[in-house]
Image (cartoon, rainbow, N blue to C red):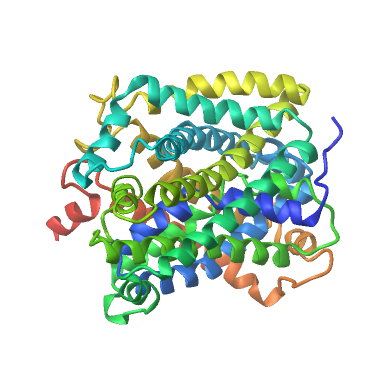
């Protein structure tokens, strides 16, 4: 099967950035920042993006470009005879499926809120009614399945076209519109009464607030936001030529991803301080709190519509990128044409996404962890706390170990082309320090996770000491 190619460098950057930009940036980042000290969290987060996210991203792109294959075959194409690195390709493919099994539902929630604001269903409702609306949506089976299905069908419908005419072209439009909406909303936030207090909380680091929890949260978010370890970035490396170094391209993508995350905070925190919304309200901040904010704002129907349209564009940029990764894996294994693979993958994804869509209604009695957990939490735990860190560790060891692809092969691929290059003096950091950081992220994520009401492994260990 002839390898497809992206039409431009801009297309590669926007596609890769679109994969990283998503709910992790514009939903999770603001509420986690609000819970973790504001500016202090932002400072630590930016540090970990550079020392953790950037190296792993370069490695994913290198494996993808050198192998000219999706994650399902990339390790097999580069590993030495009788090695078993290719088994990670299977685990990564499963990780992509699991990610979309719950991400498609979250994207559907955002689309539902956008439609509700456009229709005027949100206009004039009280803050209390706004908080109940989210729960009512989750309990409505037709709504949950219907909007999830729209996201899945729309995603694969776009991918039915060729790589350049479908994914690349649509992603360019989505990203440009998303950035424009984001800037408009951020400027609107500057004129709110609480803008000064909100921006001070968000952008002025209070070093006294830095503690173990803030550091771990920032580290986990830096890791989660880029969705590294499951080949979601590597696939786009396989679609580009060798005229640019991968460090330079990774820096461009990281800057764009970080810009979106920071701008999301510029939109949300001035509104929180203006309308007395708890900045650390948690996952409900976007859906419950912000919906109430727009109802108290002049022209709230318009601003609310624009906000959730921006959110939907951010979510769909990730959906399209990961769907393309899944599609590429299936096509490489089966040899199917793009349209046939899209139809079959679409049907399979609709079925696989049902447990999450039903997890808040028909399957609401299923609590895999604490009493408030759901199917979504189980799927998110497997992906975010297990497959992503372990997958990233696999990429690091593969690219630095003599028993893998090897550091010399990795740095040769990464440095091919014009632009900033990975220097050899970074080898000890890549080989020894970076794996330890990943292991620390993985262990801390597991031992601090609330598996049962009030129970974490860390608290259990403390009780024994």
Quarter of the image holding residue 379?
A: top left
Please say if 98 is above or below 232.
above
Quarter of the image holding residue 123?
A: top left
Quarter the C terminus occupies: bottom left
Q: Whole-percent x and y of residue 362? A: 29, 19
At x 54%, y 24%, the residue is 349
Quarter the N terminus occupies: top right
Quarter of the image holding residue 400?
A: bottom right
At x 75%, y 71%, the residue is 421
**Viewer-side residue, 215 vs 289:** 289
Q: Whole-percent x and y of residue 415? A: 78, 66
Q: Is residue 139 visible?
A: yes
**Viewer-side residue, 372 vs 21:** 21
Q: Is residue 436 visible?
A: no
Q: Count the marks: how many?
A: 0
Please say if 168 is above or below 52.
above
- 171 left or right of 107 in image: right
Q: Whole-percent x and y of residue 159? A: 69, 32
- 209 left or right of 145 in image: left
- 106 left or right of 19 in image: left
Query: Residue farthest to the front?
Result: 298
At x 52%, y 66%, the residue is 49
Please say if 172 is above or below 100.
below
**Viewer-side residue, 297 vs 427:** 297
Q: Whole-percent x and y of residue 169? A: 74, 43
């Amino acid at each position: 099967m002839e390898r497809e190619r992206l039409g431009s460098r801009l297309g590669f950057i926007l596609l890769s950035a679109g994969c990283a930009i998503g709910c992790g940036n514009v939903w999770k980042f603001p509420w986690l920042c609000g819970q973790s000290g504001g500016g202090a969290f932002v400072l630590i987060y930016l540090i970990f993006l550079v020392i953790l996210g950037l190296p792993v991203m370069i490695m994913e792109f290198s494996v993808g470009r050198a192998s000219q294959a999706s994650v399902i075959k990339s390790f097999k194409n580069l590993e030495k005879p009788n090695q078993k690195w290719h088994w990670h390709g299977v685990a990564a493919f499963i990780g992509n499926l699991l990610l979309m099994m719950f991400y498609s539902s979250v994207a559907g929630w955002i689309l539902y809120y956008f439609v509700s604001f456009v229709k005027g269903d949100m206009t004039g409702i009280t803050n209390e009614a706004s908080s109940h609306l989210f729960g009512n949506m989750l309990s409505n089976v037709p709504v949950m399945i219907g909007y999830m299905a729209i996201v899945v069908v729309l995603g694969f419908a776009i991918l039915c076209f060729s790589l350049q005419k479908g994914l690349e072209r649509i992603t360019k439009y989505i990203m440009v519109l998303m950035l424009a909406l984001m800037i408009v909303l951020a400027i609107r936030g500057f004129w709110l009464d609480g803008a000064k207090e909100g921006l001070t909380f968000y952008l002025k680091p209070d070093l006294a607030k830095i503690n173990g929890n803030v550091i771990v949260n920032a580290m986990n978010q830096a890791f989660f936001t880029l969705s590294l370890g499951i080949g979601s970035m590597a696939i786009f490396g396989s679609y580009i030529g060798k005229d640019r170094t991968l460090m330079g391209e990774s820096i461009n993508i990281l800057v764009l991803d970080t810009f979106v995350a920071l701008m999301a905070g510029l939109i949300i925190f001035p509104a929180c301080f203006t309308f007395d919304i708890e900045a650390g309200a948690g996952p409900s901040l976007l859906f419950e709190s912000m919906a109430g904010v727009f109802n108290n704002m002049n022209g709230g129907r318009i601003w609310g519509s624009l906000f959730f349209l921006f959110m939907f564009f951010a979510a769909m940029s990730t959906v399209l990128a990961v769907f393309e990764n899944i599609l590429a894996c299936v096509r490489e294994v089966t040899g199917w044409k793009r349209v046939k693979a899209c139809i079959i993958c679409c049907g399979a994804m609709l079925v696989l996404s049902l447990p999450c869509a039903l997890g808040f209604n028909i399957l609401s009695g299923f609590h895999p962890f604490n009493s408030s957990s759901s199917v979504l939490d189980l799927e998110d735990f497997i992906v975010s706390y297990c497959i992503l860190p372990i997958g990233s560790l696999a990429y690091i060891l593969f690219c630095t170990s003599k028993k893998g692809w090897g550091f010399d092969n990795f740095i040769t691929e990464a440095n091919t082309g014009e632009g900033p290059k990975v220097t050899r003096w970074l080898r000890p950091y890549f080989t020894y320090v970076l794996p330890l950081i990943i292991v620390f992220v993985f262990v801390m994520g597991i031992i601090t996770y609330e598996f049962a009401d009030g129970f974490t492994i860390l608290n259990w260990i403390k009780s024994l000491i």
